[in-house]
């Protein structure tokens, strides 16, 4: 990844992880608070139930005149103390320093303490004090469980963030790679005609005259530059769409053939042109791009001395070359932007994508027939409203 991709990647993953951790913290805090409140209520009810049982036993012993028997309690964490009406400890173990004055339930020295007046002063006992440290032990375990759960969820969130970042960055990375390749290809494509123009100009200055070959090279290089300019202009997002009007595509084909003739001559190629009057509503500039890209593509990928065929009938236009052909596994993607079937012949992977876009925009059916080592044929089939004369 380049620096821009790294910044985007780490910005996304950082934002995702921070927001996830905040959510995890809030969820963990809410869960812990809810569970703590539930445990506190349960502990209160448990101690209150114990106090009520002892209070009932005191009342029953007083009413029946029998000795007081404290009910058997399950759990060694509970401590019982009985306070008489004079405020003195009658029995049991009173938490150190605790002076009960009114019924109460609170934390005291690491224990939950319930002061209950359940005896109603029977047997001269005013309060039953029940205390336990179980709640704090449970809360300590709860904190460990919540922290472990938060850590596990945070780890899972980090893994998900990393995976999602990779998935989200993959198309961006592919687009960046395509753009970088596009820039490299455009630079390479511009370098060839610019160098040819510079050399031709130097030859003119040195010789003091202009040969036909030099003029042909200048013309071919200039038109290569103009092709790149037209492609970039068409792809410009700020481009205003032109209004379609009915034109004769045979004349467009003838203009395109004349336009590319110097380039074909420089490669010792020929163009076999068979036209047929075919009217269709399309801006002339886009018609020139449509046919020009197909012809230019055929020239580019055909060897020196080859013949490029352009044939027209009442509804179709076909462009056939004698190039190296396109592998079957490449045929489905050559119309994608920046895609090229091969690095042979140069180009920057925009010509056929422009052809595809124009065909889609005007309802033209585009088909491809290619065989490796035998050449390629592109067929344009125009809709019913195309008029032939």
Image (cartoon, rainbow, N blue to C red):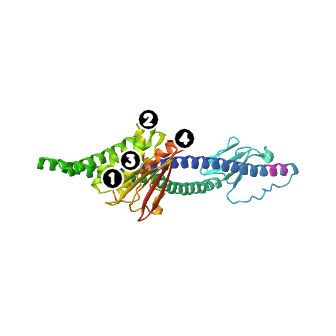
Magenta highlight on residue 57: yes
Structural crowding at the residue carrying mark 2, measured as other residues with C-alpha within 10 Å and reported as few (<14), some (14–19) or many (≥20): few
Q: CA distance from mark 2 to mark 4?
A: 19 Å
> Which mark is nearer the camera, 3 or 1?
3
Q: State the image coordinates of residue 323 (x, y, percent, origin top left).
A: 38, 60
Q: Secondary structure at mark 1?
A: helix
* Structural distance between the alpha carbons of marks 3 and 1: 19 Å
Instruction: Examine the rendering and report whether any part of residue 293 can be seen.
Output: yes
Position in image of residue 247 (x %, y %): 45, 38
Q: CA distance from mark 4 to mark 3?
A: 23 Å
Identify residue for label 4.
Answer: 385
- Residue picked out by circle 1: 185
Q: Which residues are magenta?
A: 55-60
Q: Earlier in the sequence, mark 3 or mark 1?
A: 1
Does residue 108 appear anywhere in the picture? no
Question: Which is nearer the N-term, disc 4 or disc 1?
Answer: 1
Q: Are marks 3 and 1 in contact (CB under 8 Å)?
A: no
Q: Nearer the viewer, mark 4 or mark 1?
A: 4
Residue 85, position as x, y percentages in the image: 74, 43
- Write the residue at 48% across / 46% down: 359
As helix, strand or loop, the secondary structure at mark 4 comes to loop
Q: Are marks 4 and 3 in contact (CB under 8 Å)?
A: no
Q: Is residue 353 left or right of residue 95?
A: left
Circle 2/circle 4 CB separation < 8 Å: no
Q: Which residue is mark 2?
A: 242
The residue labelled by disc 3 is: 292
Instruction: Give me the C-alpha separation between circle 3 and circle 2.
Output: 18 Å
């Amino acid at each position: 990844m380049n620096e821009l991709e790294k910044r985007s990647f780490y910005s996304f993953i950082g934002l995702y992880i921070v927001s996830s951790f905040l959510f995890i913290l809030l969820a963990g805090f809410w869960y812990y608070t809810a569970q703590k409140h539930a445990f506190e209520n349960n502990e209160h009810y448990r101690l209150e139930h114990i106090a009520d049982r002892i209070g009932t036993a005191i009342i029953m012993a007083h009413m029946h005149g029998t000795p007081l028997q404290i009910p058997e309690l399950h759990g060694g964490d509970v401590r019982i103390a009985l306070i008489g009406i004079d405020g003195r400890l009658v029995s049991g173990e009173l938490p150190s320093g605790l002076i009960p004055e009114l019924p109460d339930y609170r934390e005291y020295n690491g224990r939950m303490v319930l002061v209950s007046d359940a005896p109603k002063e029977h047997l001269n006992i005013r309060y039953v004090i029940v205390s336990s440290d179980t709640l704090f032990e449970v809360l300590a375990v709860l904190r460990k469980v919540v922290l472990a759960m938060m850590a596990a969820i945070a780890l899972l969130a980090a893994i998900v963030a990393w995976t999602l970042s990779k998935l989200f960055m993959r198309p961006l990375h592919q687009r960046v790679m395509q753009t970088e390749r596009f820039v490299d290809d455009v630079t390479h494509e511009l370098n060839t005609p610019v160098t040819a123009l510079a050399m031709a100009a130097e030859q003119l200055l040195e010789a003091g005259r202009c040969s036909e070959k030099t003029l042909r090279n200048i013309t071919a290089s200039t038109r290569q530059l103009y092709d790149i300019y037209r492609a970039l202009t068409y792809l410009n997002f700020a481009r205003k769409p032109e209004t379609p009007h009915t034109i004769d595509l045979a004349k467009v084909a003838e203009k395109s053939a004349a336009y590319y003739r110097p380039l074909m001559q420089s490669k010792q190629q020929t163009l076999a042109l068979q036209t047929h009057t075919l009217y269709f509503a399309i801006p002339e500039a886009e018609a020139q791009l449509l046919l020009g890209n197909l012809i230019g593509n055929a020239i580019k990928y055909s060897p020196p001395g080859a013949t490029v065929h352009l044939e027209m009938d009442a509804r179709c236009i076909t462009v056939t070359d004698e190039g190296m052909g396109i592998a079957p596994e490449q045929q489905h993607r050559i119309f994608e932007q920046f895609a090229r079937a091969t690095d042979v012949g140069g180009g920057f992977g925009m010509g056929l994508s422009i052809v595809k876009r124009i065909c889609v925009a005007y309802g033209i059916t585009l088909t491809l027939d290619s065989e490796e080592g035998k050449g390629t044929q592109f067929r344009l089939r125009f809709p019913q409203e195309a008029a032939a004369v």
